[in-house]
Amino acid sequence: MKSKSKATFWIVFAITIALLFVAIYGIHIGSFNLKGANEMRFGIDIRGGVAATYTPKDLDGTPTAEQLAKAKTIIETRMDAQNITDREVTVDDAHGSVIVRFPWKSDDTNFDPQAAIKELGETALLTFKDPDGNVVLEGADVKKSYASTSQSDGSFVVNLELTTDGATKFSDATGRLVGKAISIYMDETEISSPTVETQITDGNAIITGQKSLKEAKALAEKINAGSLPFAMEANDAQIISPTLGRNALKVMEEAGLLAFLLVCIFMLLYYRLPGFVACIALVLQVVGQLLALSLPQFTLTLPGIAGVILSMGMGVDANVIIAERIKEELNAGKTLRSAISLGFDRAFSAVFDGNITTLIVAVVLIALGSGSLLSFGYTLLTGVLMNFVSGVTASRLMTSSLSEYKALQKPWFYGARRLKAE
């Protein structure tokens, strides 16, 4: 049993090193592609980005404030779906336009604004037409669209959820067009032509006949993209320089590394073996946060980096509380094994209270915030969750494992005056 316990430290250490490698360099094997920290998407403040003005296309008259507000909401929703949290979407009512600012993609090397804005999706007008070419639905009538599999036969389908007005229009159209096709167009380009099998009265429709999940997702994305209240075109696309300067990221990386090293030196000198474990746990925590950012390509901004640093501080704080509790138990005459167990158990309530309040704040920021505030909330949330994984669970496993080595059972390693025999 002891040999297995001794091996626990090395298992956790090996997992930490492996995840550190993945977090930095990613995994690129054939079509399997996981992006690492060197391919992370950074915000406008760190790397710069694109600014573009979207104006109505082929619209008679000036768009209403309600139409512009809906166009703004749809563009923001698209960005949220792609984890583009560092963005500014504003409405210019006077000129009937929507102004968008967002950062470059992580793998963008050409820095072409016109190519970059294609990431935001189609800006054409979505329409549903009957066989005679009459429009029965428009993009504004679609609430959302998503791909799934049919519960009856497992085939790939596209689900449509319509607005209240859209449901009424669609009920009338499908009632008179049973057995006929309703074609879906992006401007004048047909993207699908499903046949009506029965009247749909509840505003929830299913488009069948998709050959693969990829094809179903592509159609759903086009429908969502075309749910704008009018067709739009991007004008005046231009490059935005980093607001913090081009060397800001390098300075922040160097400062972060220096701070990490200083913290580890302090922990090692003052807490010794628990401090050594805390350093490894801190590495695991940061690695988890990097993976949570790089894998989904979540935009990292300066406030997001502040969230990483804040959660690192909380991780160190958790290990300090635990190390002090272990030392107190040893000085009170407990055996080493008992002191480690009681130290973690009695420190947990303090660690839990401090982290759970921060967790609540992070969830509220994510639920109600947007842009850079969302980036801060996300990194803070992942940091708190990783603190429970690394600062509490992994630390306990590693400390208990190392304490099984006879050479590491001396009181000096735990900052205690003496150890009671087992």
Image: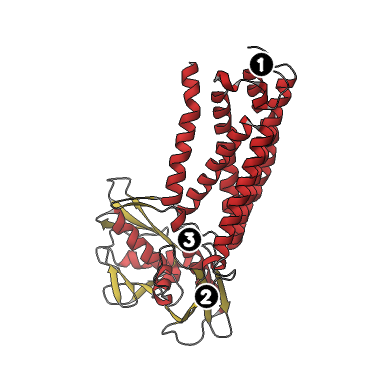
Residue 222 in the image, given as x and y percentages of width and height: 36, 66
User: Can residue 370 be seen by looking at this rendering?
Assistant: no
Residue 161 is left or right of residue 209, and the answer is right
Q: In whole angstroms, how far apart are the C-alphas of marks 1 and 3?
A: 49 Å
Position above or below: 148 against 108:
above
Q: Check disc 3 and report its element: helix, strand or loop.
A: loop
Amino acid type, callout 1:
Thr
The residue at the point 34 percent across, 77 percent down is 187
N-terminal of the pair, mark 2 or mark 3, is 3
Which one is in front, 66 or 16? 16
Front-most of residues 130 and 317: 317
Which quadrant of the view contains residue 321?
top right
The kind of residue on which mark 2 rests is Ile
Real-space CA distance between mark 2 and mark 3, rounded to the nearest whole angstrom: 15 Å
Say if 291 sits above or below 226 in the image.
above
| Residue closest to the far right | 332
Q: Nearer the viewer, residue 32 or 212?
A: 32
Q: Which residue is tagged 2?
A: 240
> What secondary structure is marked by label 1?
loop
Q: Position of residue 320 (x, y in %)?
A: 68, 36
Question: Is residue 370 or residue 56 the one in the foreground?
Answer: 370
The C terminus appears in which quarter of the rendering?
top right
**What numbered label is drawn on residue 335?**
1
Residue annotated with mark 3: 41
Point 50% across, 21% down: residue: 5
Where in the figure is residue 16, as x and y percent of width and height?
A: 48, 38
Q: Secondary structure at mark 2?
A: strand
